[in-house]
Image (cartoon, grey):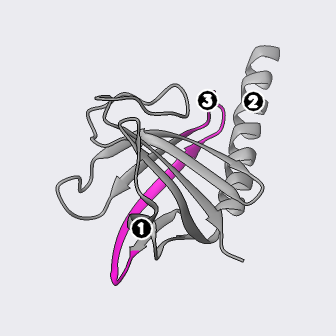
Amino acid sequence: MLILSMLLLAGGNAQDQAKKDLKRMQGTWVLAALEVDGKPVPDDKLKDTLLIVKGNKYITRVKDREIETTFTLDPSKKPRAIDMVFGEGEKKDKVLKGIYEIDGDTLRICRGLGPDQERPAQFGTWPDTGFFLVTWKRRQ
């Protein structure tokens, strides 16, 4: 009975933390940095890219195009896990596994480019890994 109570409390704590993290993610973010396969993407390619988080919707706006994904958070994992599902395109309805962290007005997400990739174990990319690391800053 004690073990069951501890498991229920731990599950409740993870759910509570997921709700807190989701609440902290809400709003509009500006793309600050992007790294793919160990190479930084030039600043001029990042210009005018926004992220809008509404509920569990992750909407990336690049110029006049929007790409919408839904996501779920699992803060009980170390590092914290995010699963993203695209609503369109070749990745439609497939789960892409990543990790996330929120530090003040900075949101970082690292994940594979394809749905067949394992979840990254750390925030970083290396040549030929197929991982990308995106850094968003909250729009003031």
Between 81 and 8, the one nearer to me in the picture: 81
Q: Is residue 30 above or below residue 121?
A: below
Q: Would residue 85 appear left or right of 80 to someone viewing this image?
A: left
Q: Would residue 2 appear left or right of 79 to someone viewing this image?
A: right
| Disc number lying in front (1 or 2) | 1
For the residues labelled 1 and 2, the Cα–Cα distance comes to: 44 Å
Residue 55 visible to an observer of this rendering:
no
Q: Would residue 22 appear left or right of 84 to someone viewing this image?
A: right
| Disc number lying in front (1 or 3) | 1
Q: Which residue is mark 2?
A: 10
Amino acid carrying label 3: it is Lys
Rendered residue at 62%/31% (across/down): 79
For the residues labelled 1 and 3, the Cα–Cα distance comes to: 35 Å
For label 3, the SS is loop
Let me know if residue 132 is in the magenta part. no
Q: Earlier in the sequence, mark 1 or mark 2?
A: 2
Q: Which residue is mark 3?
A: 77
Q: Earlier in the sequence, mark 3 or mark 2?
A: 2
Rendered residue at 41%/50% (across/down): 84
Q: Is residue 96 above or below residue 25?
A: above
* Residue at the right extreme, as displayed: 2
Amino acid carrying label 2: it is Ala
Rendered residue at 73%/20% (across/down): 4
Residue 88 found in image quarter: bottom left
How far from the left and from the top, in percent, is residue 18? 67, 48
Q: Main secondary structure of the magenta part?
A: strand
- Quarter placement of the C terminus: bottom right
Q: Are the two marked residues, 1 and 2, in contact with CB atoms closer than 8 angstroms?
A: no
Between 140 and 15, the one nearer to me in the picture: 140
Amino acid carrying label 1: it is Asp
Please provide the residue range marked out in magenta.
62-81
Q: Which residue is mark 1?
A: 44
